[in-house]
Image (tube, helix red, strand yellow):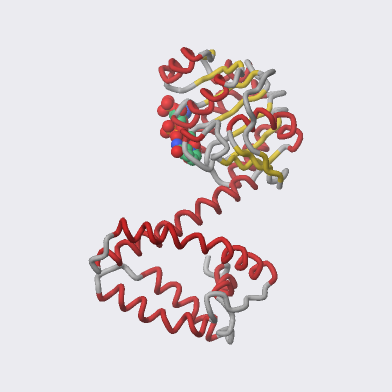
């Protein structure tokens, strides 16, 4: 995987089309206009192109007309259903273009889009967006890409204008794999955090002050994440937060404490069940990382 960060203003900027002018598509188009790209825009609700036209973009009447205007076509729509509808209306006009789809979606949708583009003589890059619209055009937003390597290399300097970028490989689904996994970690962490807030609030502790303390203690997590990654890769799972035997002894207290103050304990019960399963299998001396072994069969 290669990672690069945002460039400064581009002197000899090219032509780019942006399909989709929601919050994110508009931020992308605005950034391209500001960096000197001749930018053609299209949106289902045509009125959303007005601010961009005022800024210097050209509005096209149809998606196919917009695609015809530029060698590089960036798509940023709500979801894969919208992408299918818009690309369906573009169809053969995509021939000879590089199609960059930044719409959130699954690896299989990305691979299907790659086939769709290839069958029509276009190159395909799938990209995902790892932060909010205000960060577009800064190094503080990450865009993982996958798909055509030649398309990525040819348009790398333009893609860098949008933020920090990383190329994950020729399999078009890999950017979505990265996106789905990163988003999953965020949601798992945040739902755990919300449970903890509920817990401290039920005990009369100030939630905002607790949040400040947690913000301070999460700096200890990166080394733990790295060691768990190594443990899972090697299959050797030494004690990390202690052995599972020691960790499991705490779980009943964690669960009964939550239940006694009316806080939902489902997630802690799930963790305990996994620990008990590993211990019953003779792995009680291993660490938390060894729960990984149980996660595939529970799909
Ligand atoms: N906004 C964010 O913070 C997040 C950050 C992380 C990545 N996401 C993804 O970016 C994609 C676009 O999100 P968005 O914020 O621009 O979304 P909206 O502002 O709701 O705009 C949606 C655009 O999609 C168009 N659209 C929807 N359905 C259709 C359709 N059937 N045919 C044609 N266009 C369609 C919509 O058009 P209109 O309603 O204005 O006519 C907007 O252009 C998304 O994948 C996020 O997950 C953003």
Q: Quadrant of residue 272?
A: bottom left
Residue 133 percent across, percent down from the top left? 47, 34
Q: Quadrant of residue 63?
A: top right
Residue 138 percent across, percent down from the top left? 55, 34
The residue lying at 24 percent from left, 66 percent from top is 202
The residue lying at 54 percent from left, 81 percent from top is 243
Residue 266 lies, with reference to residue 216, above or below; the image says below
Residue 281 percent across, percent down from the top left? 57, 85
Q: Quadrant of residue 204?
A: bottom left
Residue 198 lies, with reference to residue 145, above or below; the image says below
The residue lying at 47 percent from left, 38 percent from top is 132
- Label count reads 0
Residue 280 lies, with reference to residue 293, above or below; the image says below
Q: State the residue in front, 208 or 287.
A: 208
Residue 176 lies, with reference to residue 213, above or below; the image says above
Residue 78 visible to the viewer? no
Q: Is residue 12 left or right of residue 134?
A: right
Q: State the residue in front, 294 or 109.
A: 294
Q: State the residue in front, 262 or 299.
A: 262
Q: Is residue 90 left or right of residue 11?
A: left
Residue 14 visible to the viewer? yes
Q: Is residue 237 left or right of residue 250?
A: right
The residue lying at 49 percent from left, 15 percent from top is 55
Residue 256 percent across, percent down from the top left? 31, 78
Q: Is residue 195 left or right of residue 52?
A: left
């Amino acid at each position: 995987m290669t990672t690069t960060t945002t460039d400064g203003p581009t002197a000899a900027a090219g032509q780019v089309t942006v399909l989709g002018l929601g919050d994110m598509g508009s931020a992308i188009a605005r950034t391209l206009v500001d960096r000197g790209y001749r930018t053609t825009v299209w949106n289902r609700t045509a009125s959303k192109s007005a601010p961009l036209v005022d800024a210097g973009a050209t509005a096209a009447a149809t998606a196919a007309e917009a695609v015809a205007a530029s060698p590089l076509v960036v798509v940023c729509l709500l979801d894969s259903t919208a992408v299918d509808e818009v690309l369906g209306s573009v169809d053969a006009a995509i021939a000879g273009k590089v199609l960059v789809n930044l719409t959130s979606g699954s690896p299989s949708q990305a691979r299907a889009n790659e086939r769709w583009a290839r069958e029509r003589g276009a190159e395909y890059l799938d990209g995902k967006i790892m932060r909010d619209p205000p960060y577009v055009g800064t190094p503080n937003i990450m865009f993982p890409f996958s798909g055509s390597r030649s398309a990525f290399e040819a348009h790398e300097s333009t893609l860098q204008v949008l933020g920090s970028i990383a190329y994950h490989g020729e399999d078009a689904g890999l950017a979505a794999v990265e996106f789905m996994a990163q988003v999953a970690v965020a949601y798992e962490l945040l739902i755990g955090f919300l449970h903890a807030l509920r817990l401290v609030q039920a005990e009369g502790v100030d939630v905002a002050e607790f949040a400040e303390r947690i913000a301070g203690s999460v700096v200890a997590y990166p080394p733990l994440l790295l060691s768990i990654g190594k443990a899972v890769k090697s299959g050797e799972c030494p004690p990390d937060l202690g052995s599972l035997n020691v960790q499991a002894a705490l779980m009943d207290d964690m669960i009964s404490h939550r239940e006694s103050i009316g806080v939902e304990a489902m997630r802690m019960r799930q963790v305990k069940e996994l620990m008990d399963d590993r211990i019953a299998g003779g792995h009680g001396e291993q660490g938390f990382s060894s729960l990984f072994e149980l996660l595939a069969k529970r799909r």
